[in-house]
Image (cartoon, grey):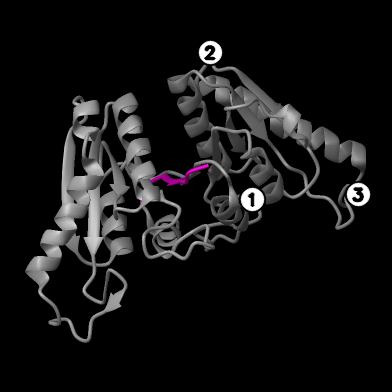
Protein backbone atom coordinates (compact mmCIF):
# COMPACT_ATOMS: atom_id res chain seq x y z
CA UNK A 1 0.00 0.00 0.00
CA UNK A 2 2.75 2.42 0.86
CA UNK A 3 2.43 4.79 3.80
CA UNK A 4 2.75 7.79 1.53
CA UNK A 5 -0.82 7.11 0.35
CA UNK A 6 -2.31 7.33 3.86
CA UNK A 7 -2.94 10.92 5.00
CA UNK A 8 -1.08 11.58 8.25
CA UNK A 9 -3.30 11.78 11.33
CA UNK A 10 -6.31 10.58 9.35
CA UNK A 11 -9.13 8.26 10.36
CA UNK A 12 -8.41 5.04 8.44
CA UNK A 13 -11.28 2.60 7.93
CA UNK A 14 -10.93 -0.97 6.70
CA UNK A 15 -13.75 -1.68 4.22
CA UNK A 16 -14.91 -4.77 2.37
CA UNK A 17 -18.53 -4.12 1.39
CA UNK A 18 -20.00 -6.09 4.33
CA UNK A 19 -22.65 -4.67 6.73
CA UNK A 20 -19.98 -4.56 9.47
CA UNK A 21 -17.84 -2.50 7.11
CA UNK A 22 -20.74 -0.09 6.55
CA UNK A 23 -20.96 0.53 10.30
CA UNK A 24 -17.21 1.16 10.42
CA UNK A 25 -17.50 3.72 7.59
CA UNK A 26 -20.32 5.53 9.38
CA UNK A 27 -18.37 5.67 12.65
CA UNK A 28 -15.17 6.75 10.93
CA UNK A 29 -16.88 9.45 8.85
CA UNK A 30 -18.60 10.92 11.91
CA UNK A 31 -15.33 10.91 13.86
CA UNK A 32 -13.43 12.55 10.99
CA UNK A 33 -16.07 15.27 10.72
CA UNK A 34 -16.13 15.90 14.48
CA UNK A 35 -12.39 16.32 14.64
CA UNK A 36 -11.85 17.89 11.22
CA UNK A 37 -9.57 15.06 10.10
CA UNK A 38 -9.22 13.36 6.73
CA UNK A 39 -10.96 10.02 6.21
CA UNK A 40 -9.10 7.29 4.31
CA UNK A 41 -10.87 4.07 3.28
CA UNK A 42 -8.84 0.94 2.57
CA UNK A 43 -10.24 -2.12 0.77
CA UNK A 44 -7.53 -4.78 0.74
CA UNK A 45 -7.74 -7.49 -1.90
CA UNK A 46 -6.02 -10.74 -0.89
CA UNK A 47 -3.05 -11.95 -2.86
CA UNK A 48 -1.06 -15.17 -3.11
CA UNK A 49 1.65 -16.08 -0.63
CA UNK A 50 4.40 -14.56 -2.78
CA UNK A 51 2.64 -11.27 -3.48
CA UNK A 52 0.93 -12.03 -6.81
CA UNK A 53 -2.77 -11.19 -7.14
CA UNK A 54 -5.12 -13.95 -5.97
CA UNK A 55 -7.31 -16.18 -8.14
CA UNK A 56 -9.49 -14.75 -10.89
CA UNK A 57 -8.94 -12.36 -13.76
CA UNK A 58 -6.66 -9.52 -12.53
CA UNK A 59 -8.59 -6.84 -14.43
CA UNK A 60 -11.92 -8.06 -13.06
CA UNK A 61 -10.54 -8.19 -9.53
CA UNK A 62 -9.14 -4.67 -9.89
CA UNK A 63 -12.50 -3.43 -11.15
CA UNK A 64 -14.32 -5.13 -8.24
CA UNK A 65 -11.91 -3.57 -5.75
CA UNK A 66 -12.41 -0.13 -7.26
CA UNK A 67 -16.20 -0.57 -7.05
CA UNK A 68 -15.97 -1.35 -3.33
CA UNK A 69 -13.62 1.59 -2.72
CA UNK A 70 -15.75 4.08 -4.65
CA UNK A 71 -18.94 2.75 -3.09
CA UNK A 72 -17.38 3.26 0.32
CA UNK A 73 -16.59 6.89 -0.53
CA UNK A 74 -20.23 7.42 -1.52
CA UNK A 75 -21.43 5.83 1.72
CA UNK A 76 -19.11 8.03 3.78
CA UNK A 77 -20.37 11.17 2.04
CA UNK A 78 -23.97 10.16 2.72
CA UNK A 79 -23.09 10.18 6.43
CA UNK A 80 -20.91 13.31 6.33
CA UNK A 81 -21.19 15.24 3.03
CA UNK A 82 -18.29 17.58 3.80
CA UNK A 83 -15.77 15.01 5.01
CA UNK A 84 -12.41 14.92 3.19
CA UNK A 85 -12.34 11.32 1.97
CA UNK A 86 -9.99 9.22 -0.13
CA UNK A 87 -9.86 5.48 -0.81
CA UNK A 88 -7.61 2.79 -2.23
CA UNK A 89 -7.81 -0.91 -3.00
CA UNK A 90 -4.34 -2.49 -2.71
CA UNK A 91 -3.43 -6.17 -2.83
CA UNK A 92 -2.04 -7.74 0.32
CA UNK A 93 -3.00 -8.80 3.82
CA UNK A 94 -5.77 -6.64 5.28
CA UNK A 95 -4.51 -6.96 8.86
CA UNK A 96 -0.88 -6.29 7.93
CA UNK A 97 -1.64 -3.24 5.79
CA UNK A 98 -3.98 -1.69 8.36
CA UNK A 99 -1.36 -2.21 11.06
CA UNK A 100 1.19 -0.57 8.75
CA UNK A 101 -1.18 2.36 8.25
CA UNK A 102 -1.50 2.75 12.02
CA UNK A 103 2.02 4.18 12.12
CA UNK A 104 0.73 7.42 10.56
CA UNK A 105 -3.04 7.25 11.20
CA UNK A 106 -4.78 8.94 14.12
CA UNK A 107 -7.25 6.05 14.49
CA UNK A 108 -7.97 2.76 12.73
CA UNK A 109 -11.63 1.72 12.46
CA UNK A 110 -12.72 -1.81 11.56
CA UNK A 111 -15.94 -3.80 11.71
CA UNK A 112 -16.15 -6.61 14.24
CA UNK A 113 -16.05 -9.08 11.38
CA UNK A 114 -16.07 -8.90 7.62
CA UNK A 115 -17.35 -10.90 4.68
CA UNK A 116 -15.04 -13.81 5.41
CA UNK A 117 -16.05 -14.35 9.04
CA UNK A 118 -18.41 -17.17 9.94
CA UNK A 119 -21.91 -16.18 11.02
CA UNK A 120 -21.20 -17.31 14.58
CA UNK A 121 -17.92 -15.38 14.84
CA UNK A 122 -18.11 -12.50 17.30
CA UNK A 123 -14.78 -11.03 16.22
CA UNK A 124 -13.09 -11.57 12.88
CA UNK A 125 -9.41 -12.33 12.47
CA UNK A 126 -8.64 -8.99 10.82
CA UNK A 127 -10.24 -6.88 13.55
CA UNK A 128 -8.55 -8.96 16.24
CA UNK A 129 -5.11 -8.71 14.62
CA UNK A 130 -5.44 -4.97 14.09
CA UNK A 131 -6.58 -4.44 17.69
CA UNK A 132 -3.61 -6.45 18.93
CA UNK A 133 -0.87 -4.86 16.85
CA UNK A 134 -1.84 -1.34 15.73
CA UNK A 135 0.30 1.56 16.91
CA UNK A 136 -2.65 3.96 17.32
CA UNK A 137 -6.13 3.69 18.87
CA UNK A 138 -8.38 1.11 17.21
CA UNK A 139 -12.17 1.28 17.16
CA UNK A 140 -14.06 -1.95 16.48
CA UNK A 141 -17.66 -1.30 15.50
CA UNK A 142 -20.62 -3.65 15.73
CA UNK A 143 -23.44 -4.12 13.25
CA UNK A 144 -26.76 -2.77 14.59
CA UNK A 145 -25.55 -2.33 18.17
CA UNK A 146 -28.43 -1.94 20.62
CA UNK A 147 -29.40 1.56 21.73
CA UNK A 148 -31.00 0.29 24.94
CA UNK A 149 -29.31 -0.68 28.19
CA UNK A 150 -27.33 0.65 31.13
CA UNK A 151 -24.99 2.66 28.92
CA UNK A 152 -27.55 4.33 26.66
CA UNK A 153 -26.36 7.82 25.70
CA UNK A 154 -23.04 7.37 27.49
CA UNK A 155 -19.40 6.57 26.91
CA UNK A 156 -18.04 3.85 29.23
CA UNK A 157 -14.37 3.60 30.21
CA UNK A 158 -12.56 0.90 32.15
CA UNK A 159 -10.10 2.25 34.73
CA UNK A 160 -7.41 0.38 36.69
CA UNK A 161 -4.78 3.02 37.52
CA UNK A 162 -2.27 1.94 34.86
CA UNK A 163 -0.62 4.31 32.39
CA UNK A 164 -2.70 2.92 29.53
CA UNK A 165 -5.80 3.29 31.66
CA UNK A 166 -4.96 6.99 31.98
CA UNK A 167 -4.71 7.22 28.19
CA UNK A 168 -8.14 5.58 27.94
CA UNK A 169 -9.58 8.13 30.39
CA UNK A 170 -8.26 11.02 28.29
CA UNK A 171 -9.74 9.48 25.13
CA UNK A 172 -13.09 8.80 26.83
CA UNK A 173 -13.49 12.29 28.29
CA UNK A 174 -12.65 13.88 24.95
CA UNK A 175 -15.08 11.66 23.03
CA UNK A 176 -17.87 12.20 25.57
CA UNK A 177 -17.38 15.97 25.41
CA UNK A 178 -17.37 16.05 21.59
CA UNK A 179 -20.51 13.92 21.32
CA UNK A 180 -22.42 15.47 24.25
CA UNK A 181 -22.57 12.09 25.96
CA UNK A 182 -22.32 11.21 29.62
CA UNK A 183 -19.29 9.29 30.86
CA UNK A 184 -19.39 6.23 33.10
CA UNK A 185 -16.10 5.25 34.74
CA UNK A 186 -15.97 1.57 35.72
CA UNK A 187 -13.37 0.20 38.11
CA UNK A 188 -13.77 -3.48 38.93
CA UNK A 189 -11.79 -5.32 41.58
CA UNK A 190 -12.02 -9.05 41.98
CA UNK A 191 -11.46 -11.03 45.16
CA UNK A 192 -9.42 -13.71 43.38
CA UNK A 193 -6.75 -11.33 42.16
CA UNK A 194 -5.91 -8.08 43.91
CA UNK A 195 -2.60 -6.33 43.20
CA UNK A 196 -1.07 -9.52 41.86
CA UNK A 197 -1.92 -11.60 44.95
CA UNK A 198 -4.23 -14.58 44.61
CA UNK A 199 -6.58 -14.77 47.60
CA UNK A 200 -6.95 -18.12 49.36
CA UNK A 201 -10.73 -17.84 49.63
CA UNK A 202 -13.53 -15.33 48.93
CA UNK A 203 -13.30 -14.23 52.56
CA UNK A 204 -9.51 -13.79 52.74
CA UNK A 205 -8.20 -10.26 53.23
CA UNK A 206 -9.51 -6.99 54.62
CA UNK A 207 -12.07 -6.14 51.96
CA UNK A 208 -12.95 -2.75 53.39
CA UNK A 209 -9.29 -1.74 53.23
CA UNK A 210 -9.00 -3.14 49.71
CA UNK A 211 -12.07 -1.18 48.61
CA UNK A 212 -10.66 1.98 50.17
CA UNK A 213 -7.39 1.43 48.31
CA UNK A 214 -9.26 0.91 45.04
CA UNK A 215 -11.23 4.13 45.56
CA UNK A 216 -7.92 5.97 45.94
CA UNK A 217 -6.73 4.45 42.64
CA UNK A 218 -9.81 5.79 40.86
CA UNK A 219 -9.63 9.22 42.53
CA UNK A 220 -5.99 9.59 41.47
CA UNK A 221 -6.82 8.47 37.93
CA UNK A 222 -9.61 11.07 37.61
CA UNK A 223 -7.66 13.92 39.22
CA UNK A 224 -7.96 17.01 37.03
CA UNK A 225 -10.30 15.52 34.43
CA UNK A 226 -13.54 16.70 36.06
CA UNK A 227 -12.18 20.27 35.99
CA UNK A 228 -10.98 19.98 32.39
CA UNK A 229 -14.34 18.67 31.16
CA UNK A 230 -16.99 20.26 33.42
CA UNK A 231 -19.58 19.74 30.66
CA UNK A 232 -19.38 15.94 30.90
CA UNK A 233 -21.93 14.21 33.15
CA UNK A 234 -19.70 11.84 35.13
CA UNK A 235 -20.72 8.65 36.95
CA UNK A 236 -18.19 6.48 38.79
CA UNK A 237 -18.85 2.81 39.51
CA UNK A 238 -16.37 1.00 41.78
CA UNK A 239 -17.52 -2.60 42.00
CA UNK A 240 -16.16 -5.90 43.28
CA UNK A 241 -16.63 -8.24 40.36
CA UNK A 242 -15.14 -9.51 37.12
CA UNK A 243 -13.97 -6.59 34.94
CA UNK A 244 -15.11 -8.04 31.61
CA UNK A 245 -18.57 -8.94 32.90
CA UNK A 246 -19.08 -5.51 34.45
CA UNK A 247 -17.82 -3.64 31.39
CA UNK A 248 -20.10 -5.75 29.18
CA UNK A 249 -23.09 -4.90 31.38
CA UNK A 250 -22.31 -1.19 31.43
CA UNK A 251 -21.66 -1.12 27.68
CA UNK A 252 -25.18 -2.29 26.77
CA UNK A 253 -26.56 0.44 24.53
CA UNK A 254 -23.54 2.72 25.09
CA UNK A 255 -22.11 4.98 22.41
CA UNK A 256 -18.60 3.62 22.98
CA UNK A 257 -16.62 1.45 25.40
CA UNK A 258 -13.03 2.60 25.93
CA UNK A 259 -10.31 0.38 27.38
CA UNK A 260 -6.52 0.44 27.50
CA UNK A 261 -4.74 -2.16 25.40
CA UNK A 262 -3.56 -3.84 28.61
CA UNK A 263 -3.87 -3.06 32.30
CA UNK A 264 -1.70 -3.08 35.40
CA UNK A 265 -1.77 -6.88 35.50
CA UNK A 266 -0.56 -7.26 31.90
CA UNK A 267 2.92 -8.40 30.98
CA UNK A 268 5.08 -5.81 29.21
CA UNK A 269 5.33 -7.92 26.06
CA UNK A 270 1.56 -8.31 25.65
CA UNK A 271 -0.10 -5.82 23.31
CA UNK A 272 -3.64 -6.76 24.28
CA UNK A 273 -4.58 -7.77 27.83
CA UNK A 274 -7.29 -10.20 28.89
CA UNK A 275 -9.75 -7.43 29.84
CA UNK A 276 -9.42 -5.61 26.52
CA UNK A 277 -9.74 -8.90 24.63
CA UNK A 278 -12.82 -9.80 26.66
CA UNK A 279 -14.31 -6.36 26.00
CA UNK A 280 -13.88 -6.82 22.25
CA UNK A 281 -15.78 -10.10 22.36
CA UNK A 282 -18.56 -9.22 24.80
CA UNK A 283 -19.27 -5.48 24.62
CA UNK A 284 -22.68 -4.35 23.45
CA UNK A 285 -21.35 -1.31 21.57
CA UNK A 286 -18.31 -0.14 19.57
CA UNK A 287 -15.03 -0.61 21.45
CA UNK A 288 -12.01 1.71 21.41
CA UNK A 289 -8.69 0.10 22.28
CA UNK A 290 -6.35 2.91 23.34
CA UNK A 291 -2.58 2.68 23.58
CA UNK A 292 0.26 5.13 23.94
CA UNK A 293 2.36 5.52 20.82
Q: Give the range drawn in magenta.
A: 284-293
Q: Which of marks 2 and 3 is nearer the N terminus?
A: 3
What whole-number distance in Å separates the C-alpha atoms at marks 1 and 3?
A: 22 Å
Residue 39, above or below 192:
above
Residue at x-position 32% and y-position 72%: 196
Asked if residue 33 lies in the magenta stretch, the reply is no
SS at mark 1? Answer: loop
Mark 1 or mark 3: which is in front? 3
SS at mark 2? Answer: loop
Please identify the quadrant where the N terminus is shown.
Answer: top right
Q: Which of marks 1 and 3 is nearer the N terminus?
A: 3
Q: In which quarter of the image is residue 57?
A: top right
Residue at the outermost bottom position: 200
Q: Name the residue under label 3.
A: 52
Q: Mark 2 points at which residue?
A: 82
Residue 209 placement, left or right of 48: left
Q: Name the residue under label 1.
A: 115
Q: Earlier in the sequence, mark 2 or mark 1?
A: 2
Asked if the residue at tag 3 contacts the one at tag 2, i.e. Cβ–Cβ closer than 8 Å, the answer is no
Give neighbour class at mark 3: few <14, some 14-19, many 20+ (Cα, 10 Å). few
Residue 22, above or below 165:
above
What whole-number distance in Å separates the C-alpha atoms at marks 2 and 3?
A: 37 Å
User: Considering depth in this image, is 260 or 113 the residue closer to the camera?
Assistant: 260
Residue at x-position 7% and y-position 67%: 208
User: Considering depth in this image, is 212 or 121 the residue closer to the camera?
Assistant: 212
Give neighbour class at mark 2: few <14, some 14-19, many 20+ (Cα, 10 Å). few
Amino acid sequence: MGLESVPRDSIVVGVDGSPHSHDAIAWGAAEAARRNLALHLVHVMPNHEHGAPGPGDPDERRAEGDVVAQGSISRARLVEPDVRVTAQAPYGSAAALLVEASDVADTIVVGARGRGAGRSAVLGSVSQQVAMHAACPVVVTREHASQDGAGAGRVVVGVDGSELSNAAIAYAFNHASMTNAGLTVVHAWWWEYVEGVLAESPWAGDWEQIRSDEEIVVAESLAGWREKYPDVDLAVHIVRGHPVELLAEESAGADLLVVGSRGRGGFRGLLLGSVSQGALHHAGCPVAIVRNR
